[in-house]
């Protein structure tokens, strides 16, 4: 896929294309899309896939920064907190209940 995109960009390399221009960006995006479609490597996401990708952004552990989206529910304290991370923090003196409340308030702030 990367090679196909590079080929489209090389076609425009002799021109002085202003990439800050909305029209130039639209033109290049259209040409890249056509090139990818014609080579069978372009996939348009469904509404469900787009919603899932958007939802994943909220599922990030506040301690380690890694995704909690694919983690089994019994290994989570909160959608923003892995159980293992909470237990490690508890060893350092921060109670799990306190961590849960922090994760909840962080999620509330992000949504409002």
Image (cartoon, rainbow, N blue to C red):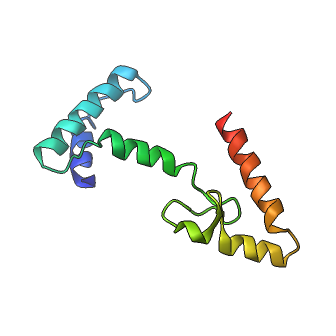
Q: Residue 50 falls in which quadrant of the image?
A: top left
> In the displayed structure, would residue 75 be above or below residue 3?
below
Outermost residue to the left: 38
State left or right for residue 104 relative to residue 1: right
- Where is the C terminus found, in terms of image quarters? top right
What residue sits 35% from the left and 43% below the top? 48
What residue sits 34% from the left and 20% below the top? 23
Q: Residue 78 falls in which quadrant of the image?
A: bottom right
Percent from the top left, x then y, of residue 97?
81, 63
| Residue in front for this viewpoint, 50 or 30 | 50
> In the displayed structure, would residue 1 be above or below residue 45?
below
Percent from the top left, x then y, of residue 65?
63, 61
* Count of marks placed on residues: 0
Percent from the top left, x then y, of residue 9?
27, 41
> In the displayed structure, would residue 111 be above or below residue 103?
above
What residue sits 60% from the left and 57% below the top? 60
What residue sits 50% from the left and 51% below the top? 56
| Residue in front for this viewpoint, 106 or 9 | 106
Q: Residue 62 falls in which quadrant of the image?
A: bottom right
State left or right for residue 80 relative to residue 11: right
């Amino acid at each position: 896929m990367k090679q196909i995109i590079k080929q489209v960009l090389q076609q425009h390399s002799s021109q002085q294309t202003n990439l800050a221009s909305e029209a130039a960006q639209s033109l290049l995006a259209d040409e890249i899309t056509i090139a990818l479609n014609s080579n069978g490597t372009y996939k348009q996401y469904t509404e469900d896939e787009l919603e899932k990708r958007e939802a994943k952004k909220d599922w990030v552990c506040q301690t380690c920064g890694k995704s909690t989206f694919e983690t089994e529910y019994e290994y989570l304290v909160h959608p923003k907190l892995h159980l293992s991370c909470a237990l490690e923090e508890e060893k350092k003196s921060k109670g799990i209940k306190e961590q849960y409340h922090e994760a909840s308030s962080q999620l509330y702030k992000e949504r409002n």
